[in-house]
Image (cartoon, helix red, strand yellow):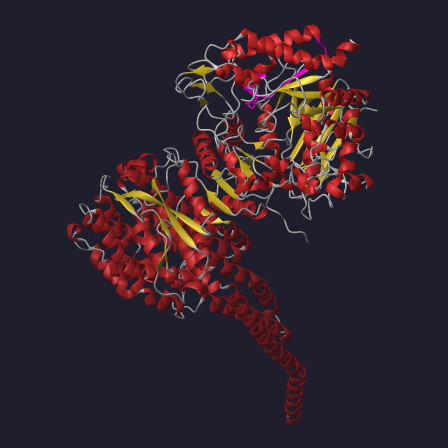
Amino acid sequence: MLLQDENLWYKDAVIYQLHVRTFCDSNGDGIGDFRGLTSKLDYLQELGINAIWLLPFYPSPLRDDGYDIADYTSVHPAYGSLQDFKDFLTAAHNRRIRVITEMVVNHTSDQHPWFQEARSSRENPKRDWYVWSDTDSRYQGVRIIFVDTEMSNWAWDPISKSYYWHRFFSHQPDLNYDNPVVREAMWEVMKFWLDIGVDGFRLDAVPYLIERDGTSCENLPETHEIIRDFRKRIDLAYPGKMLLAEANQWPADVRSYFGNGDEFHMAFHFPLMPRMFMAVKLEDRKPIIEILEQTPQIPDACQWCVFLRNHDELTLEMVTDIERDYMYDEYAVDKAMRINLGIRRRLAPMMENDRRRVELLTGLLLSMPGTPIIYYGDEIGMGDNIYLGDRNGVRTPMQWNGGWNAGFSSADPERLYSPLISNPVYGYQAINVDSQRRSAHSLLSWTKSVIQTRNAFRVFSRGSIEFLNPSNHRVLAYVRRLGEEKVLVVNNLSSSAQAVELNLQMYKRHIPIEMFGRNLFPRIGDLPYLLTLGPYQFYWFRLRRI
Amino acid sequence: MKEVVIQGLSQAYSNLVHMFAEFLPRLLVMLVIVLVGLLVAYVLKTILRAVLHVTRLDRLSEEAGASRFLRMAALPSMTELLSRSLFWVTWSGFILIGISVLGVAGLQEQISRLFLLLPAIFVAILILFLGLVTANFLSRAALLAAVNAGYPSPKLLSWSIRFVIWALAVSMALEQVGVARQTVIAAFSIVFGAFMFGMALAFGLGGKELAREFLERNLTEKKREKHEEPQPL
Amino acid sequence: MAEESFLADDFLRQLMSVGEVDLLVGIPSYNNASTLAQTLQSVEASLRQNFVRERAVILNVDGGSADETRQLFVQSAERIDAGHKGLTSLRTVHRISCEYDKSPSQGLALHSIVAAADLLRARACVVISPTTTNLTPSWVANLLRPVYRQGLDFVAPLYVRSRFQGLLARDLLYPMCRAIFGQRIRELYSEEWGFSGRLASQCLEKDVWHEEAVRARPEAWMAITAISADLKCGQYFLGPKTASPTGTGPDIVEAIRQTVGNFFWCLETNQANWLSRSNSQPVPTFGPDHELSLDGIPPSQEKIFDLFRSGVSELEPILASILAQDTHAQIEAIALSDRSNFHFAPELWVKTLYEFAASYHHAVLNRDHLVQALVPLYRGRLYSFLLENANSSAEAMETQSEILCQEFERQKPYLIEKWTAKR
């Protein structure tokens, strides 16, 4: 039982997402590496997170931020050696921090030896590892994901004189999962990392593994079959390891990736994220409630992953046109802030550096059902640089202190993989870990305490959620419940003070205890419970029956 | 003899003088009372006139159509009428008090009876006035409604209403003054009863057709009429 | 002494929950359970399609319905909300309901609506009648948009009219209001109209809500208040209008008592404003400024003429006290003329109306009676109109209408003379 519970670690996790390149440079080459990351593990432990999600660190031509992998089983030399990774893993495990890595299963780089062989001739044994065609008219009508850069899902290969299939960039040919040899090869890759000790994989772009004529080539039953196969092998040989799905789909469609608890352990809840931003701007709880009401139940051992920001753009694929226009107008007036169907900005600048709103959103994230992911830098309120092209604006070096290169690297500033944020508001002199550590009231200190509070109560990670529907629509209130543990969360989504009357008849005679200050509030009686909230204020109450 | 005559005369003279001496102050008192009464009545009249002016009684009576009747009867305006009656009622009250001061035996009793009647008279005037106003208002409302709805003989209806209310007001006023109480009530009952009987006869026998038409209109024609006339809005 | 609030605690609580809004849709109701759901759907569809981002509230003000209109309003709200996956408004569309009185009154209903608009700081408001059965989402948007986006303060509707429909407005209310207040608003008395929050606040401050003239038809008073305060008025063409078979409009007597009574009252209360105005200005109009459809059967006319003739003779003393001798004589003369040659000239009609208005001002008799005394004369004018326009084209009717309007404007000094004369 205890062991089984331990295997559900991902349900209680608070995940910290980072790219090794961006975090800390130990050898002064201007690029972050594993040794640097290892040296910052104490900071992460102090923050209270208990899992790290690493973005791809494999050898790669880096034309898609490492998602174009050229070798699955080693580490990009700029980030260190495989041994460095192993050392990092051990150090993390010593601090009870799990490590989740990226597994880009759908495609490789066109520089990968597999593809090099496959394209060399039509007779090559690896030819069938990729999807080839003599025409570019197969699978017509399949949507193009990177609408800003790609014209077609087919690309012409001048060497073998035929077309190959790619759902993302044309330098990322899709692997052919109809070929059992490919599946075996990929399982070998997974085994390689699981043997080293990695705790889980985030499987990239899973809906696109299999192609079939006359379909959208997304979410096909055959794709699920492949995932079930991987999952079965993992459960048998590596119990306690976790699979996380990246499927940017509506919750009802993502639901199938949990299967009957025999596919993914976790999946991202993509549509919720933009709606949290929307709700705060609209000052109305409707978007959040609506999307969570549309969210289906998932198997007991499964969990949603929720996040505010990540290394990609704030994706607006899972919103209606009206909602997208609204998000653009409110959060990305400047066209430079937009990319594909999304907004390339960080949390703090989107909130106009308003600490109250940053806290409200973080509070929402940490009190919603699901495993929260915190994107590196957001815990101190880092800014972005929308003029850096692609999504590099949200991938600038971590700001450790106000000194040389923000404490990120000892290299010449010109040598850094990316310029630091240096404007007076978000620059590293103003916003950095060191200065925030010194203040008990900094965003960093606040984030620590709120993560601590969350970690202390399992009801946040495992409890059910029940929305209260007070007539004041600017207040979002819900009760999280796990057995006898009950937590009432009340959020004021508006920029003005609000009064709200909550119907708490189910919790009559309970005493609300405010969770950050541990103060008692008046006992819940027969009348609706009246609360007043300042602008963007929120409360977490433990409801105790004493 | 002469003595007796002189004595008688002097007696009479002294009596006269005595009487005068006794009567003159009373007369003076009476005159003073009457004068004061005149003053008081005048002041009251002015006050009432001002008050009525402020409350726009004239306009009310004009609206109700009572003024037209006053004009027809060559009477002054409603305000004037009321304030003048108040003047006269008050002054006559004072005159009566004055006369009673004279102490003429026998007169005393009559005066006090008259005196008691004064307020009743004033109230009676008021009732008559209100009756006049109400009768006009209601009869005109009925006339307009009947004309606009196209009922037959609207004037008859209007006059009937006016008549009934007048009869009621007059009898109430007379009752108030207390003149032949029984007779008035009996007379009103007879008049009213006769009127109702007449109406009943008119509708029941003479105007059987008319009555049916009247009812038909009331109950069924409303809808038809709407179709006849174009939707106004 | 604390002033008595006419807003119920429960209503106030609902308003507090709603908070500040951009748009307010007011739906006065009285036993409208049969059509309310449809109206609500149109309103919500309109908000979804046109104002997805705006904060909106739909407010039902009920006059003591006995048929569960209010419950229906709340319940259907829940039903409609579920399951709109595609096009949906971003925010919660609030639905609140209150009972302003136990008996229906458009005036008191509007009082609650403007109070809510003021408290919620709504920028644009619209009143929608649940008796209009062909209400489309675009109506709601068209009445709201000029207020919300173009900054107008009052938006009257314009309808396609059949030739013989709405003649009271065509022959009396529109031209008279146009001449007196100088703004060419065609439909002053309608069941749908839009207004700004600013106008709502100004109206709320006026202490007129218990006046008999405002109780029944408050909308023209609102327009005239806007004109008097130099706020911007406009009109929006909505298309044909059909009323619910259950909600029968008022008959001619009632219509005149309500509208003309209200209009004369407005003259009285706003005299400071219009006495100095001359000429008239067109108002911003969205869509054609009128449209006549040529269908519609001419109503039977004999009866109308009989009612005119009998009215003139029966009401002789009353008319004599209202009209000038000369005018009265002319009317008596035409009442005696042959019905087929009958003609109630615009000039005489205008003069008649102005004398009525002045007599109303001087209160020569009870004002309600005075307005009722106009009914037979209106019938005469109506008869004349129908006689002359039995086969007219739409353009011809419009030209005639314009001539009448100009006659009203030409004779306005006569009205002022009569109005200001000492009696």
- Left or right of A356, for residue C69: left
Observer-nearest of C16 and C328: C16
Q: In the displayed structure, would residue B68 be above or below residue A316? A: below
Q: x%, y% of residue C360?
A: 40, 60
- Residue C147: tell me if it is visible: yes
What are the residue bounds of the magenta stretch?
A238-255
Residue C273: name its quadrant: bottom left
Observer-nearest of B52 and C350: C350
Q: Residue at x 69, y 21 (%)?
A: A100
Q: In the displayed structure, would residue B126 be above or below residue B152? A: below
Q: In the displayed structure, would residue B26 be above or below residue C328? A: below
Q: x%, y% of residue C329?
A: 25, 62
Q: In the displayed structure, would residue A64 be above or below residue C180? A: above
- Left or right of A285, for residue B211: left
| Residue A453 is a magenta residue | no
On-image quarter of the N terminus of chain C? bottom right
Observer-nearest of A66 and A256: A66
Q: x%, y% of residue A39?
A: 79, 29
Q: x%, y% of residue C266?
A: 43, 57
